[in-house]
């Protein structure tokens, strides 16, 4: 069986923070709600309707309307091996937004959910917040409704990252 291969490109956004690493992480975290993927999936399994589940997900969301569903302390990983580094990867999403993306684009867009933001300090001590835009990733699917939702997600990610660095 021959695989179907599609080239997916994106636009990578890198914002420079005017704050130190800890403050940038703190300000990013302040915009996010928090719930583990296990908690979200447990609630999904026990929900009797979409409306009930949607209400619970809305309760988990932060000011940005996003939920931190995972956190990877890449800086600690490398620091343990002898190379000091500050880098934190936030895995963020919202099942309500995922429902819109999946509804518009089909199951194949699920590969790109949830998304990630990376906060890191470079070799010169500057702090960055980086993420990849959704619209360029979704555009190859050729679905106008999907592009509309992806563009809205890009706006949310931009506001979230800007709130962390300003």
Image (cartoon, rainbow, N blue to C red):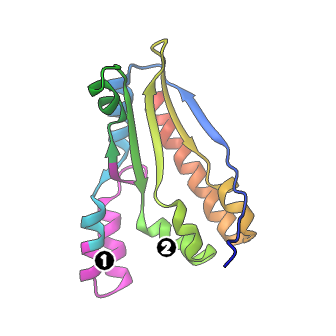
Work out whether residue 65 can be spotted: no
What range of the chain is rendered magenta? 42-70
Query: Which residue is at the front of the view, 144 or 125?
Result: 125
For mark 2, what is the residue?
A: 99
* Residue 142 percent location from the top left of the image: 75, 69
Q: Quadrant of residue 67?
A: bottom left
Query: Which residue is at the front of the view, 30 or 45?
Result: 45
* Relative horizontal placement of residue 53, taking residue 116 as reference (left or right): left
Helix, strand or loop status at disc 2: helix
Query: Which residue is at the front of the view, 6 or 15?
Result: 6
Say few, some or many: other residues with alpha carbon within 10 Å of mark 2 (under 14 / 14 to 19 / 20 or more): some
Helix, strand or loop status at disc 1: helix
Say few, some or many: other residues with alpha carbon within 10 Å of mark 1 (under 14 / 14 to 19 / 20 or more): some
Q: Residue at x 49, y 66 (%)?
A: 97
For mark 1, what is the residue?
A: 44
* Residue 44 percent location from the top left of the image: 30, 77
Residue farthest top in this picture: 124
* Residue 10 percent location from the top left of the image: 67, 48
Q: Is residue 157 magenta?
A: no
Quadrant in the picture for the N terminus: bottom right
Cα distance in 3D space between marks 2 and 1? 12 Å
Residue farthest bottom in this picture: 48
* Residue 60 percent location from the top left of the image: 30, 60
Q: Quadrant of residue 61?
A: bottom left
Vertical relation: 162 (above or below) 126: below
Vertical relation: 157 (above or below) 80: below
Work out whether residue 67 can be spotted: yes
């Amino acid at each position: 069986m021959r695989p179907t291969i599609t080239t997916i490109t994106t636009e990578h956004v890198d914002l420079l923070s005017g704050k130190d690493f800890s403050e940038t992480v703190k300000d990013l975290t302040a915009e996010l709600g928090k719930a583990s993927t296990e908690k979200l999936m447990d609630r999904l399994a026990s929900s009797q309707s979409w409306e009930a589940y949607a209400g619970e997900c809305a309760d988990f969301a932060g000011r940005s309307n996003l939920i931190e569903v995972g956190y990877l302390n890449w800086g600690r990983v490398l620091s343990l091996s002898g190379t000091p580094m500050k880098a934190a990867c936030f895995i963020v999403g919202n099942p309500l937004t995922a429902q819109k993306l999946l509804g518009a684009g089909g199951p194949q867009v699920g590969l790109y959910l949830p998304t990630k933001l990376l906060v890191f300090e470079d070799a010169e001590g500057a702090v960055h917040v980086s993420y990849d835009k959704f619209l360029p990733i979704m555009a190859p699917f050729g679905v106008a409704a999907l592009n509309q939702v992806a563009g809205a997600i890009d706006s949310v990610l931009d506001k979230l990252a800007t709130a962390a660095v300003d």
